[in-house]
Amino acid sequence: MAKKNEKNNFEALGNVYLAGFMCAGKTSAGRVLAKKLGRRFADSDALVEKRGKRSVAELVRTRGLGGFRRLEAEVVRGLAARRGLVVALGGGVYPSRRWRGLLERTGVTVFLACGWPELERRLSKAAGPRPLLAGPAKAALARAKKIYARRLPFYRRAGLSVDVTRATPAGTAELIRKKL
């Protein structure tokens, strides 16, 4: 839990947004970080699923990527209007120019940087359906690598960056806390 003077400093930051590719550890580290900072935690993908009453994969399949992005837009706007949150962003939110300005005005964004070999390992072991990884494993990972390469320059624009390649969720949360 954050100390009183530390908590006041963190409150001045606005929300803390965690950005990065899928399996970078945004949700796991975000939960730990929220507890350390005495904040509430929100996961944009989980909120999209709750609002859409289906998994992200099912929403993309039934509503298309555009329908999913519309739900995501509602969720992101709602989160940005709140204060005192640690937010795990869906992997495609921060690379979107549409959202970067809003996120930067309402808080600090932290890029959870993870090298591709480690992301590939994590993606290979990831449980649950992921729309970007549909199809044969080898082709899905090749597609994910291209998306990662396309998004990486945008992730690097975040206000802060921490290397999480070898970090545990608790270690990631502590790295972020020290940089804040």
Image (tube, rainbow, N blue to C red):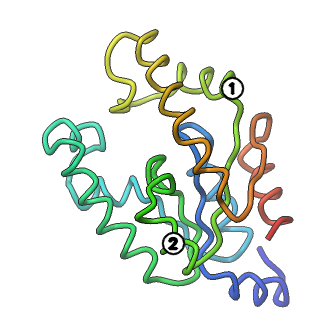
Residue drawn at point x = 24 percent, y = 61 percent = 51
Residue situated in front as seen by the camera: 151 or 123: 151
> For mark 2, what is the residue?
101
Q: Position of residue 153 (x, y in %)?
A: 61, 45
Question: Which of the 4 image quadrants contains residue 65?
Answer: top left
Q: From the viewer's perspective, is the residue at label 2 or at label 1 nearer?
A: 2
Q: Tag count in the figure? A: 2
Q: Position of residue 87 (x, y in %)?
A: 54, 64
Residue 35 falls left or right of residue 78: right
> For mark 1, what is the residue?
118
Gap between marks 2 and 1 measured at Cα:
29 Å
Q: Position of residue 4 (x, y in %)?
A: 82, 89
First of labels 2, 1 by sequence position? 2
Residue situated in front as seen by the camera: 81 or 93: 93
Placement of 114 over or under 103, stated as above or below: above
For badge 2, the amino acid type reads Gly
Callout 1 secondary element: helix
* Disc 1 packing (10 Å; few <14; some 14–19; many ≥20): some
Placement of 98 over or under 28, stated as above or below: below
Residue situated in front as seen by the camera: 41 or 60: 60
Q: Position of residue 106 (x, y in %)?
A: 55, 80
Residue drawn at point x = 80 percent, y = 66 percent = 177
Callout 2 secondary element: helix
Residue drawn at point x = 71 percent, y = 47 percent = 169
* Disc 2 packing (10 Å; few <14; some 14–19; many ≥20): few
Residue drawn at point x = 53 percent, y = 84 percent = 83
